[in-house]
């Protein structure tokens, strides 16, 4: 379920999960079906605008805590963005992400 799901939907989903059933919001189900139908090769998916912002700050040597403060998001959200951009770039760490971004012209 998405965090903005209506209260009644959340209660229904919790009850269903407690009964052992799988619960997906329509938006998540749609994204899942799209991903299954047309999977992208790792390292070929475009970065979102926010992921590019995070990556640019990482390239400047900014810590997760400082990135969170600058972008007005939580450190957990910074880590989520990093995880997503690592997957999209096909890398495993900050240094590789920055190097790959420069090689591909994502960072100028």
Image (cartoon, rainbow, N blue to C red):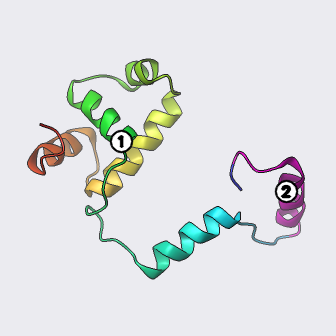
| Residue lying at 20% horizontally and 39% vertically, measured from the top left | 95
Q: Marks 1 and 2, Cα distance to the nearest angstrom?
A: 31 Å
Q: Is residue 13 magenta?
A: yes
SS at circle 2: helix
User: Which residue is drawn at the image coordinates 40% and 47% (left, top)?
Assistant: 83
Give whichever of discs 1 and 2 has the lower sequence position: 2
- The residue labelled by disc 1 is 49
* Residue 82 is covered by the magenta coloring: no
Measured from the top left, where is residue 18 in percent x and y? 87, 62
Name which residue lies at 41% across and 19% down: 70
Q: Report the quarter where the N terminus lies.
A: bottom right
Vertically, is 14 above or below 66? below
For the residue pair 5 and 15, the one nearer the viewer reads as: 5
Q: Which residue is mark 2?
A: 9
Q: How many marks?
A: 2
Q: Secondary structure at mark 1?
A: helix
Find residue 63 and report its image quarter. top left
Locate residue 94, reporting x and y percent: 26, 39
Range shown magenta: 3-19
Q: Nearer the viewer, residue 8 or 82?
A: 8
Nearer the observer, 71 or 85: 71
- Residue 68 in the image, given as x and y percentages of width and height: 45, 24
Q: Residues within 10 Å of mark 1 (few under 14, many from 20)?
A: few
Q: Residue furthest bottom?
A: 37
Query: Where is residue 106 shown, x and y percent of the image?
Result: 18, 45
> Is residue 74 depicted above or below 89 in this figure?
above
Query: Residue 25 is drawn in which quadrant?
Result: bottom right
Residue found 39% across the figure and 75% down from its top:
39
Q: Specify the principal SS of the magenta part.
A: helix
């Amino acid at each position: 379920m998405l965090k903005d799901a209506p209260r009644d939907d959340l209660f229904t989903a919790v009850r269903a999960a407690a009964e052992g059933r799988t619960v997906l919001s329509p938006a998540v189900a749609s994204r899942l079906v799209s991903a299954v139908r047309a999977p992208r090769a790792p390292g070929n998916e475009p970065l979102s605008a926010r992921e590019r912002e995070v990556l640019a700050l990482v390239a400047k040597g900014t810590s997760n805590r400082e990135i969170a403060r600058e972008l007005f998001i939580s450190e957990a959200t910074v880590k989520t963005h990093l995880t997503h951009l690592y997957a999209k770039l096909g890398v495993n760490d900050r240094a590789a992400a920055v190097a790959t971004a420069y090689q591909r012209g994502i960072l100028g």
